[in-house]
Amino acid sequence: MRKYLLILFVSCAALSSLWAQSATPAASDSSILAVDEFYTLVVQNHPLALQARLIRAQADAERLKASGAFDPKLFSDVSQKYFDEKEYFQLQNSGVEIPAWFGFKAKAGYELNEGLFLNNQNTVPGSGLWYADLSLTLGKGLFIDQRRAMLKQARLLQEAAEFEVLTAYNNLLEEALKSYWNWHQSYQTVQVYQNALEAAQFRFNGVKQQAIVGDKPLVDTLEAAIQVQDRQLKLQKAQADFITQSNTLETFLWLDGVVPLELKAGTTPLFENPALVNLPQDWLINHPILNAKSLKIDRLDITQRLNREALKPQVDVSYKFLNQPTTNDFFAEYAINNYSWAVTASFPLFLRKERGEIAKTEVKIQEAELDLDLKRLEVNNKVEALQQEFRLTTQQLLEMRSMVNNYQRLLRAENIKFQNGESSLFLINSRELKYLDSQEKLIQLEAKVNQIQAKLRAAAGVLAP
């Protein structure tokens, strides 16, 4: 009899030890994937992260394209006419054209025209004619034109691209961290039911030994066996969920955005207590979504400036300096009286097209401003709600940890009473089920708090690197 009481005592002590392990699972010898390491892998290698960086490259290309409107340009025009074995004319005009800011443009070139039937205005000296042509827009296009508007908008597009990249990072990392903590939750649940199965199996063996010698009724072995089966089913369910969450996590693991990676067998997560989220004081001012929408309004303002510029008359003035080159001195034949000039002017009478463009752009600006105000309110309210949810869930987590410890103490006490013959297998199972349920809720809360933390940082626009 003493022998089997000793066996029972050792069994209860071993069960208490197993449950202590389930409350704080020991670190595995397998490799560990910490959340910071996972975060870095996603940022550096995920295809969506690489695609986000292409937004910046595309904006740089647009800026380069817009800057091309101010590139100097070489030109050469050659025109000839032959008829009835006669050269009617041959016109040659070559040079360089340099566009500048404020509607100013400079052109330097060389003309050489000859032929039997040459138009008088095209007649030049035999050695040709050098010229320098300066033109300036005085009306529409003096302060802004299509070229300058495109370049200014391209610069704003570059700034907006940075905010779009941050927004893409925030969205990607929010989903990635959500997947990580789901994976962590499923792993911890497996550990809980692995220990629960070992405890149930150990208890079943002890009860079976007692039933053999007649200290316990045989029905207790049936109840203990059912507990083993129940823990096996829950463990299998937890293992299946862990496989599913592992596969989901693997969708965020890539090598250079090309090769999908798989988790190494035995890889486990590492739990980190969530820290209080202290957002920067200027998080709303620097929010990437809000800044991107603000820059959209700035681009529309540039378009509106260009539209209002079209209400002015078109006035273009050009002045061309002329010079006949010589072999000895380039400026030997230059005279201030050798020049040509021109003035061109135009103005639409009703300006219906121009006024229509202004009215249409004004509507777009109002829509964009309303959208910005609405988005600012939505973002601010969402962040405040998540901050409150984070605080409350953190308090729940602390309470649940205390509750788990209390349930563990009750289970240990029940094991001692069972050892002294003052309890039953039914009561131990009842205590154990409460303890298991509280452990599951604790694991869920740990994952939820960390997920809320990621959502909060993403909503505030500070989750991206």
Image (cartoon, helix red, strand yellow):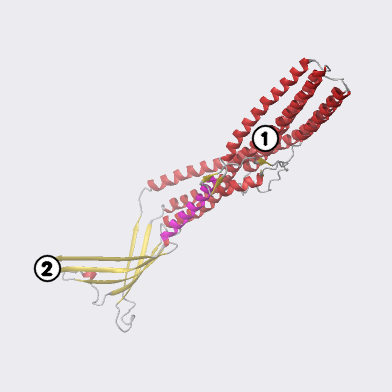
Identify the element where label 1 is drawn.
Answer: helix
Q: Which residue is mark 2?
A: 85
Residue in the foreground of this view, choosing between 100 and 264: 264
Residue in the foreground of this view, choosing between 217 and 146: 217
Q: Quadrant of the N terminus?
A: top right
Identified by mark 2, the residue type is: Glu
Q: Is residue 156 above or below residue 78?
A: above
54 sits left or right of 205 in the view: left
How packed mark 2 is, by other alpha carbons closer than 10 Å (few <14, some 14-19, many 20 or more), is few
**Looking at the magenta stretch, what is its main secondary structure?**
helix
Residue in the foreground of this view, choosing between 298 and 232: 232
Residue 14 location, x and y as percent?
Answer: 81, 31
Identify the element where label 2 is drawn.
Answer: loop
Identified by mark 1, the residue type is: Gln
Number of numbered discs present? Answer: 2
Which span is picked out in magenta? Answer: 46-69
Residue 246 location, x and y as percent?
Answer: 60, 37
Is residue 288 in view?
no
Q: Which residue is mark 1?
A: 185
